[in-house]
Each structure stands twice: as structure tokens, then as C-alpha cells.
Image: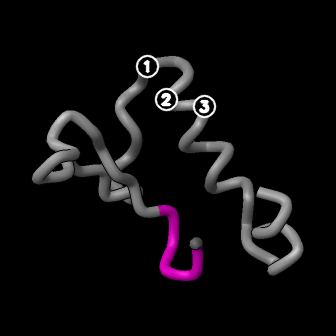
């Protein structure tokens, strides 16, 4: 997270997603959460924004 802050990314988006996950609330559609495939079928992925990563 520190790296993304240094790059100027909006970390409030990450905090919003983490709040949903901590409180076991389904994240908003804007995060495009979806199940992974292959060896990761029991995991989910969420997209914060194109520049994250």
C-alpha cells in the first residue's frame, strides 16, 4: 500500500474494498469481483482500478 501511495494511487478505494471484506459484505459491482479458474477455483479476484498493481 505504501508503494501505491508513493505512486499517487487512491488508496481509499482499497480501504473501501477491505471494509466490505472485513464485515463480510458483498463488494460493490464496481470492483468486478469474480471467481478464478484452474488451481485457484476457491479464490476470488477484485479489480480496484487499471493502474493498481
Q: Which residue is mark 1?
A: 24
Query: For residue 44, what is the image quadrant?
Result: top left
Q: Which residue is mark 3?
A: 19
In x, y percent, where is residue 2? 85, 60
Q: Which residue is mark 2?
A: 21
At label 3, counting other C-alpha atoms closer than 10 Å, the crowd grade (few under 14, some 14-19, many 20 or more) is few
Residue furthest front as drawn: 39
Of the residues under marks 3 and 1, which one precedes in the sequence? 3
Residue furthest left as drawn: 38
Spatial separation of the CA atoms under disc 3 and disc 1? 8 Å
Question: Which mark, residue 37?
Answer: none
- Mark 3 touching mark 2, by CB under 8 A? yes
Spatial separation of the CA atoms under disc 1 and disc 2? 5 Å
- Residue at disc 3, secondary structure: helix
- Which residue is located at x 11 percent, y 52 percent? 38
Identify the magenta region: 48-52
Amino acid at each position: 500500500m505504501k508503494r501505491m501511495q508513493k505512486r499517487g494511487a487512491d488508496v481509499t478505494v482499497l480501504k473501501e474494498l477491505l471494509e466490505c471484506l472485513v464485515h463480510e459484505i458483498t463488494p460493490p459491482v464496481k470492483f468486478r469481483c469474480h471467481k478464478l479458474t484452474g488451481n485457484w477455483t476457491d479464490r476470488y479476484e477484485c479489480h480496484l482500478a487499471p493502474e493498481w498493481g
